[in-house]
Amino acid sequence: MEKKKIFLLALGHMSCDVNSGALPAALPYLRSAYGLDYQATGGLMLAYSCLSSIIQPVFGLLADKLSKPWFLPLGVALAGCGIACIGFFSSYWTIFTVIAISGVGAALFHPEGARHANRVSGKSKGMGLSIFSIGGNTGFILGPLLVAAFVGGFGMKGMGVFAVLGLVMAAVLLVAITRLGRGTPQAPQKSAAGAPADGPKPVNNWHEFSRLTVVIVARSTVFVGCNAFIPLYWVNVFGQSKAAGAVALVIFCACGVGCNILGGMLSDRIGCVPVIRLAFTVMPFAVLAFSLAPSVAWAYACLPLLGFVLYAPFSSQVVLGQRLLARNIGFASGVTLGLATSLGGVAQPFLGSVADMAGLPVAIRVLAGVAAVGATFSYLLSRGPESRPEPGTA
């Protein structure tokens, strides 16, 4: 594993996903400032998520054919500036548009970043992708903190901090990525899957990948739903402050960071499919327990378990997807990362409508049902060679 390059990619991932973490934490402030209902706020999550999920596999295909390292700093800059603009406009559809632009930035960054992370991870791909994704997890944690500090202190214009952060990080990456771009794409003696060029050519297992995609969609729907509704749950169900809602989201994400590392280590030792099955077996019960929380203390106690079931399988899903589509790692990364962080947002307007009509606890119980579907498909995944650790990694 080339640790310096992995950590550089993780830094880029953090500076991109800080905006993803900021958006759900900003929703209570947007509701308060503009009088939005749950369906409208869910639509803003859709703006960020849907466009990103559609475009990300396209950028992944492009990354398979022609490396574009400058996608990384450009994606960070667009993601930061787009989110920052929501603090300077009052029109709902203008806010919707700039959030969509931020989603395009995320779509630019993730496939190229994951493709590079796969390449520089060597045989420890589970750990390498975990480190890469921890950068994103850290961004999710920092996002709500920055919203609480700057929007809480300066109003909606405090969102401008994300433009500053995005542009500074993009400049750092633009300088550093030149070396990364020269070093990683070469590896001419090996295929995208890591096999020698004169050895057996990698193949794509589309049938198995389609099953994995259902699992990913289920996980992403639950994950995005929890990110969107946890801050609102604290404010509107338990009567806590907006800052308390942001802190709850931070705790959820912080618990997930350690679980992400654990999941990566386990996938290198026992394989990707067992890790995915373990997390999804527990997931419906964890989400249901949270929806039944009678007090703030109960809800806080549920956050570590939610962090485990939603974060532990993440790197296993990405690594398994890359192995199943060994000839198109960029596309696999675009689907697994794009869907895992984006496509779940498509369901948020529907969940928002459920919350408007029946309340937030009922909307979260719907998420428990989605998790049960994911659990079913996790047991349909084959434990073939692609799901097992590479030789020498255990």
Image (spheres, rainbow, N blue to C red):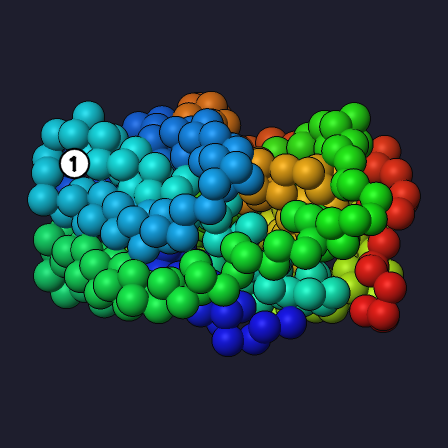
- Asked if residue 91 can be seen in this view, the reply is yes
Quadrant of the image occupied by residue 215: top right
Q: Which residue is mark 1?
A: 34
Which sits in the foreground, 379 or 67? 67
Image location (x, y in percent) of residue 354 = 48, 26
Tag 1: residue type?
Tyr
- Left or right placement of residue 265 versus residue 349 in this view: right
Question: At 78% across and 41% down in the image, what residue appears?
Answer: 201
Image location (x, y in percent) of residue 330 = 56, 42
Quadrant of the image occupied by residue 247: bottom left
- 361 versus 13 height, above or below: above
Image location (x, y in percent) of residue 146 = 27, 64
Q: Quadrant of the C terminus?
A: bottom right
Q: Secondary structure at mark 1?
A: helix
Question: At 48% across and 30% down in the image, what residue appears?
Answer: 58
Tell me if mark 1 has few (under 14), some (14-19) or many (20+) residues whose alpha carbon lies within 10 angstroms of its own: few
Q: Quadrant of the N terminus?
A: bottom right
